Every structure is written in structure tokens, then in C-alpha cells.
């Protein structure tokens, strides 16, 4: 012990014995509970949450001045009574506390950000470097979160899932340093609802009194239940209508087949021949009506007995009264398809 004491005296250049630096009790408590008090590790997305927790813990133990620079380091060397320089005990105490605080900061920073602060000495410089590094990324992250919140839609999600996503976005935006008002939250939520909630959106927007966010979420969940019940009721009605329609179509087609079969039997029983009806009588028709339909008289499918041409009979033949015309002899064969002329 005497040798160690004399060595310390020789290094300090003074005959005064060196004093042992003791760790303050507050620092012991701080180092023992820093991991349990700061529940998040610093990332590029949660800087404000991490900063708030760590700064409150430093302030509660009177160490916030080391972070903000209000407690600067004292002079490292001072002069003793004999005029020789020696290590300033205040600096040694300050260095002890500051390095413990720097270690505490390291323990709460994620591995991806540690390379930015490993070569920095004091806690104040570490704190300031983190602020500078994450300030620009924090602003871009804020703009990105606001854009995602603006484009968020209900879609195929349930109302609980939709509201949970909105809450996560709002919390992230608030953590980035830009809290959103309740009216803006309601506005973003209503914009993401489909047209089936149009009456609900109109009722909320035309409401004169303000509404809390909890009551608004409860009303949305209740509206979802009512809309789901209406959709189930309509689907049941549509299914019942489809069954009735299918039954009516089946019955109609069955009756049509029966009537077609009946007509087929009557037709086969009284099979008509060309030029005759079912009863065997020649078909009767108003010749004037037939002639007047197209404005022209129909040509008869008969052969003239005088000239042998088709389309007129011997009564209307041009050569009927011509004594010089020689009749062409023809052979007439009776067939089933020939129609008898009057």
C-alpha cells in the first residue's frame, strides 16, 4: 500500500496522498435500473419515444445536465500548493459519472445505430450526434406515415382490424413528433370507409356537437353489425327468390313438353297432304286478301294445257283464241306434290 501511495504521489507531482474516487449512490441506482426503465431500444423509427424515456430517467436522477451540456467537464489539471500540476479531482468525478452515463446510452441503442457513436467520448456528444443523425430520417418517416394514413381503406378487413391499423399509424406519427387532432383522426377514418357507410358518414359530418374518439369507434363497430345483418337478410331473400324462380321455370318447361307432345299426336293422327288440310278438305283462303298483300297477284303453280308454260291455265292463255297456234302435246303425270287447278 505504501508503494502504491508513493507511486501515485510521484505521478501527480505532489506530496499529498491521492484520494479514492467513490461512485455516487444515485449513479449506482441509475445503472442498476436503466435497462428496466427504458423499455425500447433506439431505432430510426422510435427516436422520440426513446428520447422521452431516457431524458426523464436522467432528469429524475439529476444527470440531465450531462446530456444537454449544462454540466461541462471541468479542467483536467490543476496546480497544487507547490506549483506543480495534478489531476483535478472534480474532473475525475465528472469523468466517472459521464462514462457510466455513456455506457447506459449504449445499452439502449440498437446494433444498427451503434457504429455512429462508438468513437464519441462524452455523453453530450453522443446525445447530440443521435439528434443530428435521426432528425432528417424522422421527418421523412413522418411524411410517409401521414401518406399511409391518408390512403388507408377498409377493404376486406373487419372494422376492428381497420381501426387497429389507424391507431398504429396515429401512434407512430405522434411518436415522430407530430400528434394528430381528434377531428383529423375522424376525418381520415371516414375517408377510408366504402359507399355502404355513406349514411353513417353523412350523420357524423353533419353532427353539430363534437364526439370523442372512443364513442366514434364504438359507433363504427355497431354500424358494422347492422350492415352485416342487412346483408345477411338480403342474401336470404335473394336465395329464396332464386329457388321460386327455378321451380316456376321447371314447371313451365314441363307443361310445354306436355303440350308439344299433344300437338304432335294430333298432327300424326291427321297427317296433312299437300293442298289439303288435316280433315282432308282443301285449304280455303280469301284470294283477294292474298292478292292484295303484296300488291300483285300470285302466280299459280299450274301448267297451261295449250302452250305448256307454267304460271297460267288454259282459261287465261294468250293462244286460246288463236286458230293458227298449234298445241304442243304434253304428258301429265299425277304426283303427290302437284296441286290441282280450279
Image (spheres, helix red, strand yellow):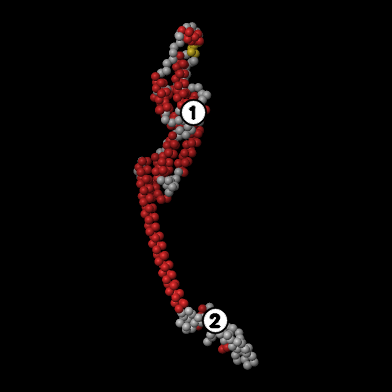
Q: What is the residue that sits farthest to the bottom in this orientation?
A: 323
Q: How many marks?
A: 2
Residue 55: quadrant of the picture: top left
Question: In x, y percent, where is residue 336?
Answer: 54, 82
Relative depth, front residue between 242 and 201: 242
* Secondary structure of residue under mark 2: loop
Where is mark 2, residue-wise? 337
* First-in-chain label (2 vs 1): 1
Does 318 appear above or below 97? below
Residue 58 is labelled as none
- Horizontally, is 328 left or right of 35 in the view? right
Image quadrant assignment for residue 66: top left
Q: CA distance from mark 2 to mark 1?
A: 109 Å
Residue 76 locus on image (x, y percent): 49, 15
Q: Which residue does the image show at 50% across and 33% down from the upper left?
A: 136
Quarter of the figure that contains the N terminus = top left
- Residue receiving disc 1: 130
Residue 312 appears in the picture as rendered: no
Marks 2, 1: nearer the viewer: 2
Q: Residue at x 44, y 47 (%)?
A: 155
Position in image of residue 54 (x %, y %):
43, 27
- In the rendered image, which quarter is residue 93 located in? top left
221 w.r.t. 280: above or below? above
Crowdedness near tag 2: few (<14), some (14–19) or many (≥20) residues, C-alpha within 10 Å: few
Q: Residue at x 44, y 77 (%)?
A: 266
Q: Please tell me which residue is depicted at 63% across the width and 88% down the height of the picture.
A: 328
* Residue 247 pos. (x, y %): 39, 63
Q: Is residue 183 visible?
A: yes
Q: 10 Å neighbourhood of mark 1: few (<14), some, or many (≥20)? A: some
Secondary structure type for disc 1: helix
Residue 313, compared with residue 226, is above or below; it is below
Amino acid at each position: 500500500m505504501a508503494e502504491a501511495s508513493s507511486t501515485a504521489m510521484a505521478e501527480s507531482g505532489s506530496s499529498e496522498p491521492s484520494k479514492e474516487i467513490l461512485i455516487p449512490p444515485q449513479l449506482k441506482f441509475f445503472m442498476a435500473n436503466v435497462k428496466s426503465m427504458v423499455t425500447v431500444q433506439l431505432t430510426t423509427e422510435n427516436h422520440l419515444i426513446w428520447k422521452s424515456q431516457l431524458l426523464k430517467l436522467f432528469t429524475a436522477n439529476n444527470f440531465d445536465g450531462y446530456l444537454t451540456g449544462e454540466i461541462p467537464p471541468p479542467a483536467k489539471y490543476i496546480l497544487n500548493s507547490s506549483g506543480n500540476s495534478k489531476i483535478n479531482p472534480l474532473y475525475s468525478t465528472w469523468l466517472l459519472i459521464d462514462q457510466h452515463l455513456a455506457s447506459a446510452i449504449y445499452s439502449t441503442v440498437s446494433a444498427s445505430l451503434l457504429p455512429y457513436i462508438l468513437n464519441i467520448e462524452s455523453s453530450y456528444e453522443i446525445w447530440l450526434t443521435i439528434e443530428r443523425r435521426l432528425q432528417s430520417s424522422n421527418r421523412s418517416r413522418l411524411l410517409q406515415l401521414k401518406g399511409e394514413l391518408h390512403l388507408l381503406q377498409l377493404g376486406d378487413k373487419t372494422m376492428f382490424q381497420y381501426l387497429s391499423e389507424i391507431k398504429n399509424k396515429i401512434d407512430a406519427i405522434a411518436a415522430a413528433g407530430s400528434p394528430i387532432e381528434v377531428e383529423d383522426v375522424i376525418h381520415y377514418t371516414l375517408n377510408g370507409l366504402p359507399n355502404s357507410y355513406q349514411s353513417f358518414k353523412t350523420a357524423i359530418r353533419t353532427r353539430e356537437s363534437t364526439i370523442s374518439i372512443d364513442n366514434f369507434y364504438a359507433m363504427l363497430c355497431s354500424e358494422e353489425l347492422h350492415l352485416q345483418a342487412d346483408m345477411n337478410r338480403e342474401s336470404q331473400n335473394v336465395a329464396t327468390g332464386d329457388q321460386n324462380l327455378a321451380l316456376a321455370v321447371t314447371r313451365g318447361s314441363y307443361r310445354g313438353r306436355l303440350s308439344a307432345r299433344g300437338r304432335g299426336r294430333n298432327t300424326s293422327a291427321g297427317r296433312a297432304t299437300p293442298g289439303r288440310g288435316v280433315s282432308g278438305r282443301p285449304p280455303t283462303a280469301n284470294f283477294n286478301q292474298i292478292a292484295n298483300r303484296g300488291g300483285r297477284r300470285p302466280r299459280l303453280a299450274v301448267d297451261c294445257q295449250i302452250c305448256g308454260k307454267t304460271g297460267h291455265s288454259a282459261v287465261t292463255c294468250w293462244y286460246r283464241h288463236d286458230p293458227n297456234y298449234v298445241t304442243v302435246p304434253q304428258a301429265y303425270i299425277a304426283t303427290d306434290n302437284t296441286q290441282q287447278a280450279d
